[in-house]
Image (tube, rainbow, N blue to C red):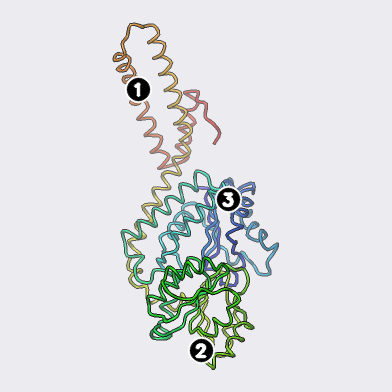
Amino acid sequence: MPLVCLGLSHNTAPIEVRERHVFPAERMSEALIALHDYGAVREALMLQTCGRLEIYAELDDYETGVEQLKSFLQHFRHGSVAYDLESYLYTLLGREAVEHLFRVSTGLDSMLIGEAEILGQVKEAYAAAREANSAGEVLHKLLREAMSAGKAARTQTRIGEESPSVATAAIELAKRRFGSLEGRGVLVIGAGKMGGAAAKRFRREGASNVAVLSRTLERTREVIAQIGAGEALEPGELVNALTAADIVITSTGATHFVLTPEIVAEALQARSGRPLFIIDIAVPRDAHPAVGELPGVMLVDIDGLKSHVDEKLEVRREAVPHVEEIIGEYVDRFRRWYKSRATVPVIASLTQKAETIRAAELERLFARLPELGEREKMLMTGASLTIISKLLHTVITKLREKAAEESSEAITHAKLLQELFDLDVADR
């Protein structure tokens, strides 16, 4: 398969590298269009989460195509980077790329195994590629199968049980830190999916005052309305909000630091020595690393969050063998489909030619026998369709089977059929 996955993830690159290669949502279509313009790239899709950036592509040529993908990552946003990007990248070819995507979509390769957000992120990547028209037949099929595998894993196994999301894992860490959230003041910065989920869970866990701050006051008020209580804040109220809070969870889409040492230090002056616990689940990070060096501040970023909650996921790990069986079934199914594609144009041309001949001969016959009634014509039409179907059935079935077993032999047979039947096969 000329399929490839090129990427970097929490397994290969630290957060300071991953955040340099985040594509803002508003630039994703632009990036996909630019990527699709590379000569060796037939189809392309980018999957971006808090833990990874991966490009899935159908290439004309592996060597040339992979180099073009690397060039795109190196230069599209940055012009150049000071570090050796290739040392953080992995390249998966053919079946390995397919299997990896299915491991991602089922949650096996997530930062928090089985995390709830990943399937939605795969759907968003698919939607973005469709919008940019960068995904063709192969990636459409691959992504549909990946989403189907993810759903199967969640319905047939316990991979999604216990701590179901990054936001919930952050709250579990806060509970471990404070023992109980009752009576605690919480500030959620960001009113997107993660921020909204965190605000709801904090409220359910008994936090006395939940404040939500974001750039869009209307969206912030929607989150507060959903949780039934709390304060909707604007960016200008950040210092006062930090002064009042015990726990801060931040998850914005900002490309700059929202929490700088200067802002947090100003808030600390009015806290009378009260400790401040900040959990930053954003990528790129919302909190400057130096914030964690301020007295009385504990800062955990998303990579640190993973190490704190790993032991909570034992139930999910028990489901891994079953999920891997599901992945194997979906990989084999996609592989059979992919190999059979080489024979599709020949099969389509053969059946079309047979149908054209059948219809023309039947029309000539009806013209020579005007006395035939509608019932007789219908019976003769049905008989002709049955003859064509039975005649071609074995040929088409054998060709598809050969394609699934050994692509090169199937192509040889397909070319022979094309020559023997003088088929007009469109170049695909």
Q: Name the secondary structure under disc 3.
A: helix
Asked if the residue under mark 1 is in contact with the one under mark 2, i.e. CB atoms within 8 Å, the reply is: no
Q: Nearer the viewer, mark 2 or mark 1?
A: 2
Spatial CA distance of label 2 from label 3 is 54 Å
- Numbered disc total: 3
358 in relation to 33, above or below: above
Residue 243 higher or lower than 421, as above or below? below
Secondary structure under tag 2 reads loop
Horizontal side of 293 relative to 185 (left or right) equals: right
Q: Is residue 396 visible?
A: yes
Q: Mark on residue 275? A: 2
User: Contact, CB < 8 Å: mark 3 with mark 1?
Assistant: no
Q: Residue furthest right?
A: 79
Q: Is residue 251 left or right of residue 150?
A: right
Q: Is residue 27 left or right of residue 311?
A: right
Mark drawn on residue 385: 1
Q: Residues within 10 Å of mark 1 (few under 14, many from 20)?
A: some
Residue at numbered disc 3: 62
User: Which secondary structure, mark 1?
Assistant: helix
N-terminal-most mark, 2 or 1: 2
